[in-house]
Amino acid sequence: MFRGSIVAIVTPFSAKGGSAGGAKELVVDEQKLRDLIEFHIKNGTSGIVPCGTTGESATLSFEEHDRVIEITIEQVKKRIPVIAGTGSNSTQEAIMLTRHAAKAGADASLQVSPYYNRPTQKGLYEHFKAIAESVNIPIILYNIASRTGVNIEPETIAKLAHDCETIVGVKEASGNLDQMSRIKQLCGQSFDLISGDDSLTLPILSVGGTGVISVVANIVPKDVANLVAEFEKGNLKKTQEIHYKLLPLIKAVFLETNPIPVKTAMGLLGMCEPDLRLPMCAMLPENLEKLKKVLKDYGLLK
């Protein structure tokens, strides 16, 4: 159902007059968000995820969260799927956000596993089932234990896929290819296995993955789109060439916590302001120099 290079789009901010507690007051730059969406559509991106980790959803107010999703849907105009990030560690909040996204016209919802409160597998099952029963749009689970503190086990994913017809896939960022293979084995070919790690997109495609929800696509959407497209054509050698070309850039955009490096890179490239909301902060000088070198080596920065 969901294939190709799907960008986990940044939320661009602009500075508003004054400061809050010594920090710049930042507001969502709605026009820049629209510009970035057009950039992605022109460069072969297959779908857009607003309000994910890369979109700094954790520091958006509910009103901003809803507005970013609305703008994305308005600007995309059904040209490619919009998969709205509407997860929460509160089931009721996740339902509220997902209902809004569905009403606004989102094509699907991305649901991160509840973070900090670390539910059991039964709790995860009940959480996602309650959300699935509250809306009629497709749901993609998001498994990223390194951020949430809990892994969604393959058996739990399989039970959800069996019991909830709207749960159609998983963004897998566990880094565990054995687990991903097990998910595909248990859930079948119709269940979308989507890479949540840019560096593992090629291996995940090889075990039956359908694409990637990508961070690095924020700056090189065409290359990420081509990687998936060449694999689907059966051009393994070309896919490997693109993979190894991308690899240093992928490593660079994870020199620090996402989205710090990718937003910094976009600032250097004039794509948007590099501003981040606290507690995300500017890159360390030594890491900034490493990032600049990789961007220059890639041919993106003079």
Image: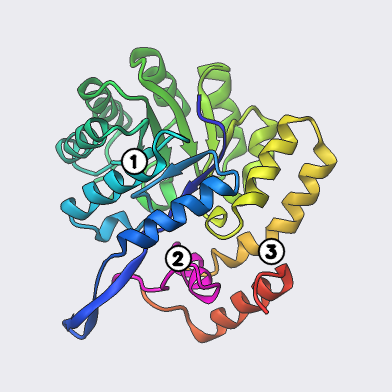
First in sequence: mark 2 or mark 3? 3
Instruction: Specify the amino acid type for callout 1.
Output: Ile
Task: Report the residue at 51% width, 86% height from top.
Answer: 285
Is 200 above or below relative to 265? above
* CA gap, disc 2 and disc 3: 16 Å
Residue at horizontal 44%, vertical 63%? Answer: 259
Q: Nearer the viewer, residue 131 or 82?
A: 82
Magenta residue check for 86: no
Q: Which residue is mark 3?
A: 248
Residues at marks 2 and 1, CA–CA distance in whole angstroms = 28 Å
Label 3 is placed on what type of residue?
Pro
Which residue does the numbered mark 2 point to in the structure image?
257
Q: Position of residue 103 (x, y in %)?
A: 22, 31
Q: In front: mark 3 or mark 1?
A: 1
Q: Secondary structure at mark 1?
A: helix
Mark 3: few/some/many CA within 10 Å (<14, 14-19, 20+): some
